[in-house]
Image: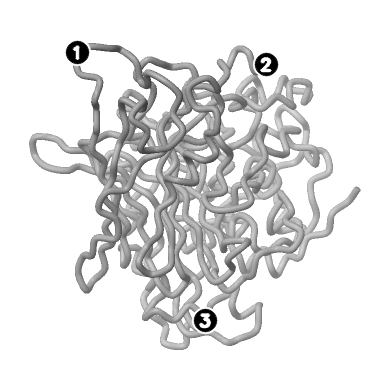
Amino acid sequence: MELRINRRALIALGVAGALSASSLALLRPETSGASSHREAPLIAGDPRNDNTDLYAFTSPDRPETVTLIANWLPFEEPTGGPNFYTFDTRSRYNIKIDNDGDAKPDVVYQWTFRDEDRRGTTTFLYNNGQVTSIDDENLLFRQRYTLRKFTRRGAVTLVRNGVVAPSNTGAASMPDYATLRAQSVKGLPNGGRTFAGQADDPFFLDLRVFDLLYGGDLSEVGQDTLKGYNVHSIALQVPKHELALNGDARRNPVVGVWSTTDKWSPGGYRQVSRLGNPLVNEVVLPAGLKDTFNAISPDKDAGIAAVVQRVTKPELPKLIEAIYKIPAPKTPRADLVEIFLTGIAKANGPIKADLNSQLLNRDARARAFRPSEMLRLNMAVPPARDPNRLGVLAGDLQGFPNGRRLGDDVVDISLQAVEGAAQSGELVQALATGDQVNENDRPLEGRFPYVPLPHTAAVNQQR
């Protein structure tokens, strides 16, 4: 079936540029995994600090709020005992928001963790009996966290002693894991909520793309490479005005979002991981700049020439043309650079009330805007009644790249965008089926934190 695309909406939301850069994930065979799993040399050896995916969307069941989810610790084998998986107690995990367009954080939510280990020297067990609550005495190891919020006005502690949902050790040990998760969701003073703990990795794709783009004849597609693996998630749900410039989400609905990890070293805390749009650092940047990108803030992005070069002349269309004989769009792709580096909006400020103006987010005051890479969300776009996995490409303006929902098929979207779907207004039919992995292997939860419950079976039993 041929799908027509609302080109004006695409350009307004920035799909062409944001996705052309994202879809460079298919440029060359890295040893890394999906999205930003193991994307840079240094972080590949430090999984507890490796930020794998970032999501930002208007909450479907609480549309007055926004949900932000960041995942760490890629490829958790569910049966990886006896210690299982934890957050790093010597690190700070951050979700940052830019609401005025200068590529610097205006609001920062920061989680720090501490261990509560009662095993001592008498047992190797994670739990010595059934665990029916997060405070169960049979749970011999747990983590607790502190959540602080930083703004230009100062810092405030939102949670002092939150409990991390434990790793799911199996049905015999945790017969009702859903209850443990529900008990670990913590309310915030402003009516928001937060969660930290293990979850199924909600990202879905077929990574065999690295075998000459699925074998050169699309014969290898259809297997979810991440099926069966878990991650550690941090989720936050807050009222929209908490993120918006001047607290006015109606007039200033566009925000930029990224997540980082700061790890303690002898010289103090040092940023070692950073994530905005999926796939960007993993394959947009050359190996020599990957660690640098992980260590800098978005306001430094304009100085990385490799980002501009990779977007103006993306390699993926050339590879597709060589292997599948689909003509590559002409370069340089100046339009993609403009949209990617400036994101969805070129300035975040007062706008008109109609939808197109909201998407374009024109600022009459012409506030200075700094090009930068981050996931941008227009909070004025309401939740879709019938979400489409192709997001904006399919006319679903709440979907990627207007933020990113858990069910957005960013790989298929990216393939289409880099092949010029945003310019032509039509899907490239030769690639219409994408990688044939169209949804996660586990259904999403209907309420916060939305991420699926973690797996317990060994991955090699999932196939």
Q: Residue 107: image x %, image y %?
A: 32, 65
- Report the amino acid beneath label 2: Arg
Residue indicated by mark 3? 250
Q: Residue lying at the far right in this picture: please name it.
A: 1
Q: Residue 397: image x %, image y %?
A: 67, 64
- Report the amino acid beneath label 1: Thr
Q: Quadrant of residue 213?
A: top right
Q: Residue 420: image x %, image y %?
A: 70, 51
Q: Earlier in the sequence, mark 1 or mark 3?
A: 1
Residue indicated by mark 1? 121
Can you tell which mark lies on residue 224? none
Can you tell which mark lies on residue 463? 2
Q: Viewed as shown, does residue 458 lie left or right of 213? A: left
Element on which disc 1 rests: loop
Image point 11% across, 42% down: which residue? 268
Q: Earlier in the sequence, mark 2 or mark 3?
A: 3
Element on which disc 2 rests: loop
Residue in the foreground of this view, choosing between 221 and 227:
227
Mark 1 is surrounded, within 10 Å at the Cα level, by few (under 14), some (14 to 19) or many (20 or more) other residues, namely: few
